[in-house]
Image (tube, helix red, strand yellow):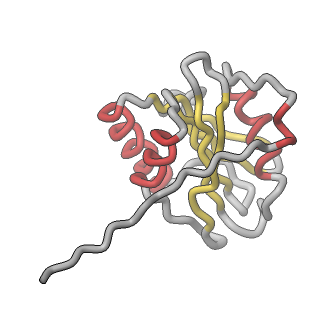
Amino acid sequence: MNTTKLYEFNVICKKNEEYQAIDIVCNSSDASYQILKRIFDKVSINIKEYFFALYVSNSNQIIGYSMLSMGGMAGTVVDIRILFREAILANATAIIIAHNHPSGKLTPSEADKKLTQKIKDASLFLDIKLLDHLIISEYGYFSFLDEAFL
C-alpha cells in the first residue's frame, strides 16, 4: 500500500507592540525608509546583508513585515516564492522590498537590478504590486522607484 504524508501549515500573526499605536501609511520612499530603518536597527546592518519585505494594504497601510533572508558580507539569497507566499498569507495587495549593503554603498548592483525585475514580473502575474525596492545603509537609502528603476 502506498502512503502519502500530508502536512498541516499554520499561519502565525503576532502584534508587534512597537508599532501598535502608530497608523503606518507608506506614501513615499522616505516614509518606507523611516519604517525600515526601525526594523533594520534590530539587526547588524553593517555586518551581514538582510532582505525584508513590507506587506501593504489597498490603503497603503503597512499590515506586516518579515525578514526573508540573512546572508553574508557580500550578498543574500532571496526565494521569490517565499516572498509572495508571505504576501498572500498577509492578504497584501502590494509589497515594498528592502535590503541593506553592509559596505554602506547605496548603488544597486546588477544582481539587485535583476532581482528587482524578477520580483516585478512575478508581482504583475500575481496582481500584488511592487511599490518600491529600497537599499538601506546607516547613511541613508536608495529607492528604485525614485530613481526610475521601477
Q: Residue furthest front?
A: 1
Taking the spot 62% from the left edge, 46% from the top edge, the residue there is 98
State the quadrant of the N terminus: bottom left
Decide: is 4 above or below 35. below
Q: Nearer the viewer, residue 24 or 90?
A: 90
Q: Residue furthest bottom?
A: 1
Q: Nearer the viewer, residue 134 or 83?
A: 83
Decide: is 43 above or below 88. below
Can you give x and y, in whole percent of width and height, for residue 103 in the image?
A: 72, 62
Left or right: where 10 falls relative to 100 = left
Q: Residue furthest top?
A: 59
Q: Nearer the viewer, residue 146 or 129?
A: 129
Left or right: where 108 falls relative to 29 = left
Can you give x and y, in whole percent of width and height, for residue 18 in the image?
A: 87, 41
Decide: is 5 above or below 69. below
Taking the spot 82% from the left edge, 51% from the top edge, the residue there is 138
Taking the spot 66% from the left edge, 24% from the top edge, the residue there is 61
Taking the spot 56% from the left edge, 48% from the top edge, the residue there is 108
Residue 127 figure quarter: top left
Left or right: where 83 falls relative to 5 = right
Decide: is 58 above or below 107. above
Can you give x and y, in whole percent of width and height, for residue 70 in the image?
A: 62, 66
Can you give x and y, in whole percent of width and height, for residue 115 in the image?
A: 43, 50
Residue 60 figure quarter: top right
